Every structure is written in structure tokens, then in C-alpha cells.
Image (cartoon, rainbow, N blue to C red):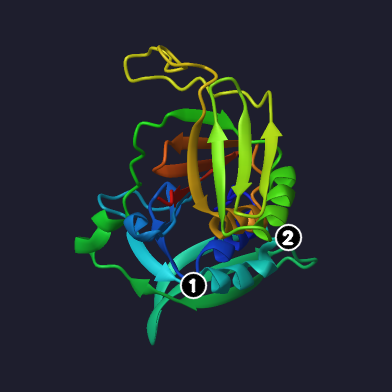
């Protein structure tokens, strides 16, 4: 984990979104997974981190259930660490051992260890925690500055439990609140649309579509506010994919971190 980017910020973000989640450890990557049942209104999370060191072998991976807040507290000591290592141990019960090597003025290193209780997921259940598939989306758009979006959503949260997100292929996005007493809309323009490519190499950008036509989904505003309030990844790119009246799919990208968050639409 010598190049593990901003671990505490990532874990803090996840801790704001879930009380418990699944950690998948492989030779090359770490995955943090929240797999609520979208059909019943639950949000889903898929966070992927590269640059982990391990021993190469077939099926050299494991799935663990843990409390993100516990890992967040353990990583408080890692802010100035030289190296952070994670391994699975059995100390009265399965534990995720976080060993933090700290700088020292002497020749010997200072190492702080934390043992975090975990539950080991049986291999027969691994398929339940594979990367979620995304239906063909109607619109993909870059998000505005997340701090600005957070400020808007926090104000709207006081007016309604639901928010409508709509966007088109001309780089326009609206956040709307509509109740019996008030109607509020915030407009964003010139956001840009990612040039997603199809498998055959052709660009999927709006062929045969009306560029001005809006695709919308109504979602739980608290779930969106949780994502924006807990976001500490400082993404270099933030995207939103909308499947009309079905789901909103957020993607946050930063260096070797990819975080996906799925919020189902409300009928």
C-alpha cells in the first residue's frame, strides 16, 4: 500500500454512507462494497483502489464485512506514515490488522498496529458482491463543483424529501424541488458530456438523440446529501449517469481511486 492514495479520506467518505460494508482484498486492488437492494430503495456503493502489494496466486483474494468507522479511526495515525500494511489475522476472532510505520528520528521504525474485527464472507456468496451492472443510460454528464452542488442540495433538503435531477446532452443539468407549496430549480450550464465509447469503437455521444431533451430521475434527497456531505476524495472528475425514472449513477475519480454510487429513482 505504498501508493495508497489518501486512505483516511476515502474511508471517511464510506463511513458517512454506510454503517457496515464489504472489503474485498485482492493482489492488485482493494474494493469497498455496499450492496443494498436497489429494488427496495437502497443505495449501492462500489469503490475501487489500485496499488496494493500482495503475493500472486490463484484466487488470492478475500471478502470481509467490517465497520468503516473503525477503519477510519485506525487510519488517523497514518497521516504521516511511511508505509501502511493491511493483513488478516486471527486474534480470538478474525481481525484486519492495520500496521502503520511512522517516521522516526532513530534508526528503528515506530510501528502502530490496530486490530479491527471483521466477518469473513464465504466464497459461495462472493457473487453477491460483484461490480454492479449499469443499464444503458439516457444521459451522461460531468457534475458541477461538488461544494457548490452540496450547498444547493443542503438548502433544498429543508424543503422536500425528494429531488429531481435532470440533464441533457448539451451539458445542462437542473436540480429541482417541487411541492404543493414551492417549486425551486437550480440550473447548471456548460458542464460538458463525457465521450463514452461503445464496444465497437464508435462514440455514443448523442447519435440519433435530441441534444436538448432532458432525462430525469426523482431520488431521495438524503441519500444524495450523504454522498456530497461525506465526500472527501476530492475527485479530479465527477460524473453522473441518468437512466430515466430508474436510477442515478455517480462516478468519482481521483488518481487511482474510483468510487461509484447508485441511487434508485422513486416512482
Q: Residue furthest left?
A: 124
Please report the residue visible at 56 percent of the width from the left and 65 percent of the height from the top. 15
Mark 2 nearby-residue class (10 Å; few <14, some 14–19, many ≥20): few
Asked if residue 105 shows in the view, the reply is yes
Q: Which residue is mark 2?
A: 80
Please report the residue visible at 36 percent of the width from the left and 39 percent of the height from the top. 134
Question: Which mark is on residue 263?
Answer: none
Q: In front: 16, or 153?
A: 153
Please report the residue visible at 40 percent of the width from the left and 59 percent of the height from the top. 41
Q: Locate residue 162, reporting x and y percent.
A: 55, 54
Asked if residue 109 shows in the view, the reply is no
Q: Residue furthest front?
A: 180
Question: Which mark is on residue 67?
Answer: 1
Mark 1 secondary-structure assignment: loop
Which mark is in front, 1 or 2?
1
Q: Locate residue 91, reporting x and y percent.
A: 41, 83
- First in sequence, mark 1 or 2: give its number: 1
Mark 2 secondary-structure assignment: loop
Mark 1 nearby-residue class (10 Å; few <14, some 14–19, many ≥20): some
Q: In front: 157, or 6?
A: 157
Residues at marks 1 and 2 touching, judged by CB atoms closer than 8 Å = no
Q: Using residue 7 as the reference point, say whether residue 49 is left or right of it.
A: left
Q: Locate residue 174, reporting x and y percent.
A: 62, 36
Measured in 3D between alpha carbons, the distance from the residue under mark 1 to the one under mark 2, in whole angstroms, is: 23 Å
Q: In front: 109, or 258?
A: 258
Quadrant for residue 70, please give it.
bottom right
Q: In front: 211, or 106?
A: 211
Amino acid at each position: 500500500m505504498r501508493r495508497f492514495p489518501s486512505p483516511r479520506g476515502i474511508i471517511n467518505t464510506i463511513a458517512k454512507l454506510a454503517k457496515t460494508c464489504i472489503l474485498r482484498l485482492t493482489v492488485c486492488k482493494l474494493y469497498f462494497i455496499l450492496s443494498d437492494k436497489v429494488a427496495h430503495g437502497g443505495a449501492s456503493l462500489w469503490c475501487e483502489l489500485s496499488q496494493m502489494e500482495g503475493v500472486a496466486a490463484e484466487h488470492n483474494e478475500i471478502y470481509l464485512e467490517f465497520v468503516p468507522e473503525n477503519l477510519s479511526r485506525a487510519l488517523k495515525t497514518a497521516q504521516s506514515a511511511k508505509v501502511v500494511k493491511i493483513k488478516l489475522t486471527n486474534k480470538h476472532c478474525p481481525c484486519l490488522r492495520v500496521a502503520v510505520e511512522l517516521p522516526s528520528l532513530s534508526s528503528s521504525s515506530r510501528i502502530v498496529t490496530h486490530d479491527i474485527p471483521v466477518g469473513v464472507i464465504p466464497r459461495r456468496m462472493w457473487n453477491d458482491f460483484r461490480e454492479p451492472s449499469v443499464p444503458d443510460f439516457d444521459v451522461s454528464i460531468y457534475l458541477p463543483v461538488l461544494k457548490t452542488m452540496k450547498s444547493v442540495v443542503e438548502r433544498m433538503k429543508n424543503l422536500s424529501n425528494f429531488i429531481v435531477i435532470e440533464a441533457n446532452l448539451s451539458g445542462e443539468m437542473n436540480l429541482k424541488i417541487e411541492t404543493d407549496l414551492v417549486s425551486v430549480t437550480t440550473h447548471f450550464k456548460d458542464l460538458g458530456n463525457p465521450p463514452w465509447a461503445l464496444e465497437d469503437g464508435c462514440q455514443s455521444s448523442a447519435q440519433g438523440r435530441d441534444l436538448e431533451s432532458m432525462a430525469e430521475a426523482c431520488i431521495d434527497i438524503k441519500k444524495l446529501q450523504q454522498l456530497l456531505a461525506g465526500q472527501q476524495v476530492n475527485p479530479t472528475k465527477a460524473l453522473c449517469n441518468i437512466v430515466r425514472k430508474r436510477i442515478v449513477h455517480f462516478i468519482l475519480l481521483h488518481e487511482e481511486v474510483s468510487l461509484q454510487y447508485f441511487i434508485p429513482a422513486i416512482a
